[in-house]
Image: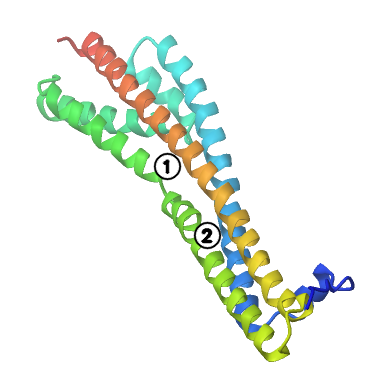
Amino acid sequence: MPFTFPADLSLWDIIQNLRPVPLAIIVLLILFSLFSWTIVFSKGTVFSRAKRENRSFLRAFRKASNLQAVAVASEQFTSAPLVAVFDFGYGEIERQIKQRGALVNKDAIERSLQLGISEEVTKLEMNMSWLATVASVSPFIGLFGTVWGIIDAFAGLGNAGSASLRAVAPGISEALITTAIGLAAAIPAAIFYNVFGTRIKEMGTRMEDFAIEFQNLAERDFGG
């Protein structure tokens, strides 16, 4: 018997008549997608502000005559990761000057700078694991919905007792919808995970370079 396509079956009809399991899968995927986009916009704002203030602070740092002048200027750029690294290094210098009257342990300064870099990179990486989770898990959740829809389609075909598209269309449609929504949730999350990962590496490199500049200025200020 030839297939007969149900011409009156619309996407809205499919959505209205979703069964509990496909509906639960779609709701879960939509929540995942909304969560990942919330992270994307939040991280995008953080990275934009950090890049802008890093640039401004770096200009002030290079124009300053000494570390004390930099410390005063840094108060204007509190969102810059470079300022946090500077505070770690400058704090160690102040401790050494206060306790011993001179800069006597350069290794301690370097370690303090590395701690600052590590802490800032950790902050920048916050919530990145969630993007990775959404990117990796969403297609499998969609695939589960696909399998469930195909099972329903064959069940409908068996109950109908005939090879009619009207019998299998609801299950197949649900399968395709869950697949599409799973990919729609996963693809942006994967893209932005890679984009933000690259930005974090670039900022980490910038902080490493800044640590060298900081140590050079410290040696000029306090002797080496």
User: In the rendered structure, which amino acid carries the disc numbered 1?
Assistant: Leu
For label 1, the residue is 124
Disc 2 crowd, CA 10 A, few/some/many (<14, 14-19, 20+): many
Gap between marks 2 and 1, in whole Å?
26 Å
Residue 137 as seen in the image, left or right of residue 211: right
Question: Which type of secondary structure does the marked residue at label 1 adopt?
Answer: helix
**Residue nearest the observer in this picture, 136 or 98:** 136
Label 1 crowd bin: few (<14), some (14–19), many (20+), radius 10 Å: many
Q: Check the image and report above or below for 133 versus 68.
A: below
* First in residue order: circle 2 vs circle 1: 1
The residue under the point 27% across, 18% down is 212
Residue 159 image offset from top left, x and y in percent: 68, 91
Q: Is residue 61 above or below residue 168?
A: above
Q: Nearer the viewer, mark 2 or mark 1?
A: 2
Secondary structure at numbered mark 2: helix
Where in the figure is residue 157, as x and y percent of width and height?
A: 68, 83
Label 2, on which residue?
A: 139
Q: Residue at x 48, y 44 (%)?
A: 193
Q: Residue furthest right?
A: 8
- Horizontal and vertical percent position of residue 124: 42, 42
